[in-house]
C-alpha cells in the first residue's frame, strides 16, 4: 500500500478462486464483487447498511459488503451466494429456502442465505427466536419472515453439521 | 453510493499509525470497524482527505486479562466481545450490551473503540463505559495517557481524544463486593438506535449496603451521560424498592432528552428513563443477591 496512490492493487480469494484487482480506496466491496467480478448475486438494496441484501462472508463472518471498502478485504477470503453450490448442486441452505418457499420476490434472498450460513456455523441448532435475531440484519418486504424462519429451521435440521 | 475520494493508509504498527496521523496535519481520521464512519462517508455527510485503517494492527486486537482488570483492544469486534468468556464472566454488563448493538453483520465488523470515538449520543457502548467507570487508553505523539469515563465525551460526536491520538484499548476494573448489572434498552425495531438505554452496575456488601453504583444513560443527552444524582440516591444505603424508585426518578429528571419525530417526545423519553432505570436496578440488585 503506497501513500497517496489513486488506485491500489488488492488480492483476495473469492469463492475459492484467487483474484486481483486495482481499486480506488473508495471502491466498496460490493461494487468490486458486482462490477469487476460480475458476481451480481450479491445485491445492493438500501445502500445504507440497513437491509443486509449485500451480505457476504469474509473469512467466515457475515459482513455487509456495501459498508466495507474493497481495500479492507485485501488478503481475505470472501464467499458470495454464487460460492455455495457444489458441482451444480444447491447447498443445504439454498435447498431449504426452495423447499420452504422462504422467498417471494427473491431480492433479499442472497443476503438472507449468507446470514443463515453464518448463523448456522455459530449455532447449528437455533431456536425460532435465535433465528429471528440471527437474520435481524436482513430485511424482507414480501414474506413477513415466517417462511424464511421455517427455511432456516429446515436447513438446520437437514444440514447434519454442514453449515452450508 | 460512493464516498468522495480519499487517500488510504494501512499501517501495521501502532507507532506507524501515530506517525501517519501526526504528519497528516489534521487531515486524517482513523478507520476502525467503519460501521458508523462508512455510512457517513457514503452519504457524504462527512468528507475526509485521508483514512488510516487500523484494522491490521495486531496489538489492538487483544483482550488483556489481569488480576484487577480486563482490557479490550480498540479493534476487538463486538462479536468477539459478545463471545468472550474472559469479558462476559467478569463483566456480564458488557456481554449484555454487546447483544443489543446493531445486528450480527454490524457486530462482526464494529468495535467498542470505534463506537466510543464516534460518540453518537445514542451509542450503546457509551452507557456501559460510564456505568462501569471504564478507562480509555490513548496513544499520541507525546506518548500514552488515560481518559476516565467522566471526561471522555465532550458533546455530540465529540470526545477528549485529540485529533493526533488513537484510542488503543478500553480498560474495566473489577468491582468489589457482590455485583449485579443490567442494560434496559427500548428500541423501535430490532437493531435500531436506542429510544432510551439505561446501563446499571451495582455492588453491595454483606450487610446489603450499596458500595458501588454506576448508571449510564444513552439517547437522552448530548452524549452518553452519567446519572450522578441517581447514583447518589443509592450509595451507602440498603437497596430497597423505595431507594430504587427515587434513583430512577432522579435519573429521569437529570437527563436532557430532545423531542424527535422518530422516537418520541422529550417527556416520553424521560418517562422511559424512569421505567428502564427501575427495571435495570431491580434486575441488578437481584443478581447481586439483594432482597427487595
Image (cartoon, helix red, strand yellow):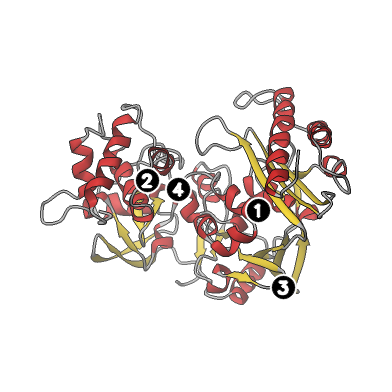
Q: Which mark is residue B141?
A: 3
Quadrant of the drawing holding the N terminus of chain B: top left
Q: Which residue is mark 4?
A: B104
Number of numbered markers: 4
From mark 4 to mark 2, how far is it between C-alphas?
14 Å
User: B157 or B292: nearer the eye?
Assistant: B292
Judge if badges 4 and 2 mark residues of a common chain.
no
From what the image shows, is residue B124 above or below residue A143? below
Secondary structure beneath dot 1 equals helix
Q: Residues within 10 Å of mark 4 (few under 14, many from 20)?
A: many
Residue B260 in sight in this render: yes
Across and down, in percent, residue B262 comes to 59, 26
Q: Which residue is mark 2?
A: A126
Name the residue rendered at 28%, 31% in the picture.
A147
Judge if badges 4 and 1 mark residues of a common chain.
yes
Name the residue rendered at 64%, 50% in the picture.
B125
The answer to whether A32 appears left or right of B203 in the picture is left
Judge if badges 3 and 1 mark residues of a common chain.
yes
Q: Are marks 4 and 1 in contact (CB under 8 Å)?
A: no
In the figure, residue B274 lies in which quadrant?
A: top right
Name the residue rendered at 72%, 69% in the picture.
B68
In the figure, residue B161 lies in which quadrant?
A: bottom right
Across and down, in percent, residue A121 comes to 34, 55
Q: Are marks 3 and 1 in contact (CB under 8 Å)?
A: no
Across and down, in percent, residue A99 comes to 18, 37
Name the chain under label 4. B
Q: Are marks 3 and 2 in contact (CB under 8 Å)?
A: no
Q: Which residue is mark 1?
A: B116
Name the chain under label 3. B
Secondary structure beneath dot 4 equals helix
User: B98 or B113: nearer the eye?
Assistant: B98
From mark 3 to mark 4, how far is it between C-alphas?
36 Å
Amino acid at each position: 500500500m503506497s501513500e497517496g496512490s489513486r488506485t491500489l492493487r488488492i488480492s483476495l480469494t473469492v469463492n475459492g478462486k484467487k483474484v486481483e484487482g486495482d481499486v480506488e480506496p473508495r471502491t466498496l466491496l460490493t461494487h468490486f464483487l458486482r462490477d469487476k467480478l460480475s458476481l451480481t448475486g450479491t445485491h445492493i438494496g438500501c445502500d445504507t447498511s440497513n437491509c443486509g441484501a449485500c451480505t457476504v462472508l469474509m473469512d467466515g463472518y457475515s459482513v455487509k459488503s456495501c459498508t466495507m471498502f474493497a481495500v479492507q478485504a485485501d488478503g481475505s477470503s470472501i464467499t458470495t451466494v454464487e460460492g455455495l453450490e457444489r458441482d451444480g448442486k444447491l447447498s443445504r441452505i439454498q435447498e431449504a429456502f426452495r423447499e420452504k418457499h422462504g422467498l417471494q420476490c427473491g431480492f433479499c434472498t442472497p443476503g438472507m442465505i449468507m446470514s443463515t450460513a453464518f448463523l448456522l456455523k455459530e449455532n447449528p441448532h437455533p431456536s425460532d427466536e435465535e433465528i429471528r435475531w440471527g437474520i435481524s440484519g436482513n430485511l424482507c418486504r414480501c414474506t413477513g419472515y415466517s417462511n424464511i424462519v421455517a427455511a432456516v429451521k429446515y436447513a438446520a435440521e437437514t444440514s447434519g453439521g454442514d453449515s452450508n | 453510493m460512493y464516498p468522495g475520494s480519499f487517500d488510504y493508509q494501512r499501517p501495521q504498527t501502532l507507532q506507524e499509525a501515530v506517525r501517519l496521523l501526526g504528519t497528516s496535519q489534521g487531515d486524517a481520521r482513523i478507520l476502525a470497524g467503519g460501521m458508523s464512519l462508512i455510512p457517513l462517508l457514503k452519504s457524504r455527510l462527512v468528507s475526509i482527505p485521508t483514512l488510516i485503517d487500523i484494522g491490521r494492527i495486531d496489538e489492538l486486537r487483544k483482550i488483556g486479562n489481569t488480576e484487577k482488570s480486563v482490557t479490550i483492544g480498540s479493534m476487538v469486534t463486538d462479536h468477539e466481545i459478545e463471545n468472550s468468556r474472559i469479558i462476559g464472566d467478569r463483566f456480564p454488563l458488557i456481554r449484555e450490551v454487546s447483544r443489543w448493538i446493531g445486528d450480527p453483520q454490524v457486530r462482526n465488523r464494529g468495535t467498542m473503540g470505534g463506537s466510543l470515538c464516534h460518540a453518537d449520543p445514542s451509542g450503546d457502548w457509551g452507557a456501559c463505559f460510564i456505568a462501569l467507570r471504564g478507562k480509555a487508553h490513548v496513544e499520541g505523539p507525546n506518548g500514552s495517557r488515560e481518559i476516565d469515563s467522566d471526561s471522555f465525551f465532550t458533546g455530540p460526536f465529540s470526545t477528549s481524544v485529540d485529533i493526533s491520538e488513537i484510542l488503543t484499548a478500553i480498560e474495566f476494573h473489577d468491582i468489589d463486593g457482590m455485583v449485579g448489572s443490567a442494560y434496559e434498552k427500548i428500541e423501535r425495531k430490532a437493531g435500531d438506535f436506542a429510544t432510551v438505554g439505561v446501563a446499571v452496575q451495582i455492588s453491595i456488601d454483606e450487610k446489603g449496603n450499596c458500595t458501588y453504583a454506576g448508571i449510564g444513560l444513552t439517547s437522552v443527552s448530548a452524549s452518553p451521560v452519567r446519572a450522578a444524582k441517581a447514583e447518589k440516591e443509592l450509595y451507602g444505603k440498603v437497596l430497597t424498592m423505595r431507594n430504587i424508585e427515587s434513583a430512577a426518578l432522579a435519573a429521569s429528571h437529570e437527563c436532557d432528552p430532545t423531542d424527535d419525530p422518530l422516537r418520541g417526545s422529550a417527556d416520553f423519553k424521560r418517562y422511559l428513563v424512569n421505567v428502564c432505570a427501575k427495571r435495570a436496578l431491580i434486575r441488578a440488585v437481584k443478581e447481586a443477591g439483594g432482597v427487595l
